[in-house]
Image: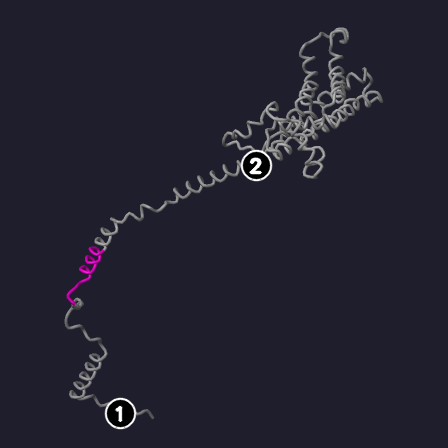
Amino acid sequence: MTNTTPTPEPSPDEVARGLAELERHLTEQAPPAPAHPAAPPVVAGGETKRVRQLRAEVTEAHLLADLQDDDAPLMLDTPKVRKRRKAAREASRLHELAQDPAMRAWQAARMLRLLVSVAMISLTLALAWSTAGVQHFASEGAAAWSPSWVFAWLVEPFMSMALLFVVGARAYLATRGQPIVSRTLVRIEGVFLALTFGMNVWPYLPWSLPEGKAFTVSGIVLHILGPSIAVAIVIALPIVLGAFAGLDHERSTAAPTGPTYWTNAAPGGADIAALADRVRDLIDAGKLPEAPSATRIQRTLRCGMDTARAVRDALVKEAT
């Protein structure tokens, strides 16, 4: 059986006490409200942030004014000045190095290698150019790929190899200060070049042309081009190499040589016989090789190059 006893209602005093407790509780939980707005911070000495900034600017201005009177920064080299100074110093050292005899000898040797390479390549191409003309002459109208036609291609190569043998020997010995002075070799070169020249030109001369084919100057010029270049190189190469072999690397190119050199520059101004006797004594003493070059004689005797050549020729003449 359910209990239906009614709950007693609170009295007015209890209600009042409950409301008072609830208000006190809410008051304790709420954050306290500020009584007055925040006041600006007080700086010691009475200086604010703006005052400190202005004081720093004034102090900086006084320091800058004092430093502007100092010219030390103007005396320092800028990067551009240092770069130019470095380039000038490098150019000066390179110029000084270029006056060194060893450097001049190295430059001459490098230029000599270049010139010899160009000359030999040009000579080889010129002889190869004339190969077709020589083959046309040697084949005598043989059928293509026949034995006569094939062997005709070998005529110019074996003549060219013989010619290059003679030219190479003369060129090498010229670089060593011992040029070959031989009419026999000159005649041999002339024979080879004349054969090459003649075999290239003969089929295109007016009396050698087949009937119905007109003579043209351009045909002759085209076929003598290779032999002409070969002749020019064969004649010029030993002369150029002999000039390189006679270079005086000790003589400075920056300033004129002194009177001591020019006193003995001409063979007529020196006693060639006495100098030759002195060179023979040095050869016997082992201070000079058996056949010294003109450059070696010039350096040893400290005489002119013309005099050294005259002494060398006198020694060669006596030896023969």
Q: Is residue 117 visible?
A: no
145 or 313: nearer the eye?
A: 313
**Magenta span:** 45-59
Residue 187 makes an appearance in the image: yes
Residue placed under numbered mark 2 in the picture: 101
- Closer mark to the observer between disc 2 and disc 1: 2
Whether pointer 2 and pointer 1 mark residues with C-beta atoms closer than 8 Å, the reply is no
Q: Is residue 212 above or below residue 20?
A: above
At horizontal 52% and vertical 39% (from top left) the residue drawn is 97
Q: Quadrant of residue 6?
A: bottom left
The label on residue 5 is 1
**Label 2: few (<14), some or many (≥20) within 10 Å?**
some
- Write the residue at 17% across / 60% down: 51
* Residue sitting nearer the eye, 202 or 50: 202
Q: Quadrant for residue 111, please give it.
A: top right
Residue 48 is a magenta residue: yes
Mark 1 closeness class: few <14, some 14–19, many ≥20 residues within 10 Å: few
- x, y percent for residue 122: 67, 25
Q: Left or right: where does residue 82 sit relative to residue 291?
A: left
Q: Earlier in the sequence, mark 2 or mark 1?
A: 1
Gap between marks 2 and 1 measured at Cα: 138 Å
Q: Nearer the viewer, residue 182 or 118?
A: 182
162 horizontally vs 63: left or right: right
